[in-house]
Amino acid sequence: MPEQEARADFRFIVRDNEAAAARALQERNFVHAYFLIHALVESLLRLFLKDQGERTTFNDLISNYSRFLKEQRYPEPEFVDELTTFNQRRNRIVHQLWRRGFSLTNTQAEAAARAAVTLYGLFIEWLETFDPEITTIGFEYDDGA
């Protein structure tokens, strides 16, 4: 029973963050939306890879995911390049906040935030091919499009 309670709590957290990301997009707060989606993708990777290490970075997770694909003898490293670019873009947004301020950075982050939503949804579907239970944990993002 305690495991089911933990999953129920996690589902609530995922849904809450997905709803917050959708609201941020509607309110044109693209920086916030991008950061929320980045956190959701990181959580998705951590759960999928069963890596809850506090010191595990996003780049470490990408490397672990790439290793997983190799172990599965998957011929193409699906999503590895996209996740790397996604993380690099997050880092650039953080730096731009300090260099250019919120307003300009937010305006420039619109396309990135919208692409992040698409990446998140596609990545969930892709990971379901390895773990059909991933959506029962709570990852079911739908931006209403």
Image (spheres, helix red, strand yellow):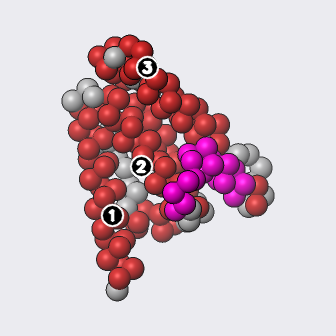
Cβ atoms at labels 1 and 3 below 8 Å apart: no
Q: What residue lies at 50% left-to-right and 30% top-to-bottom?
A: 91
Q: Amino acid at mark 2?
A: Leu
The residue indicated by pointer 2 is: 40
Q: Position of residue 111 (x, y in %)?
A: 41, 23
65 is higher (above) or lower (below) than 134: above
For this view, does 38 lie left or right of residue 27? right
User: For this rendering, which residue is in front, 28 or 126?
Assistant: 28
50, above or below 145, in the image: below
Label 3 SS: helix
Relative to 130, is 132 on the left or the right? left
Question: Residue 17 location, x and y as percent?
Answer: 31, 49
Nearer to us in this view, 49 or 129: 49
User: Which quadrant would residue 129 be assigned to in this image?
Assistant: bottom right
Mark number displayed over residue 106: none
Residue 55 included in the magenta stretch of the image: yes
Does residue 4 appear in the picture of this structure?
A: yes
Secondary structure mostly seen in magenta is helix
Tag 1, which secondary structure? helix
Q: Looking at the image, which residue is at 76% across and 55% down? A: 70
List the residue tagged with mark 3. Answer: 96
Location of mark 1 (residue): 11
Q: Which residues are magenta?
A: 52-69
Observer-nearest of 114 and 47 = 47
Dividing the image into 4 quarters, which one contains the C terminus? Answer: top left
How far separated are the C-alphas under marks 1 and 3? Answer: 32 Å
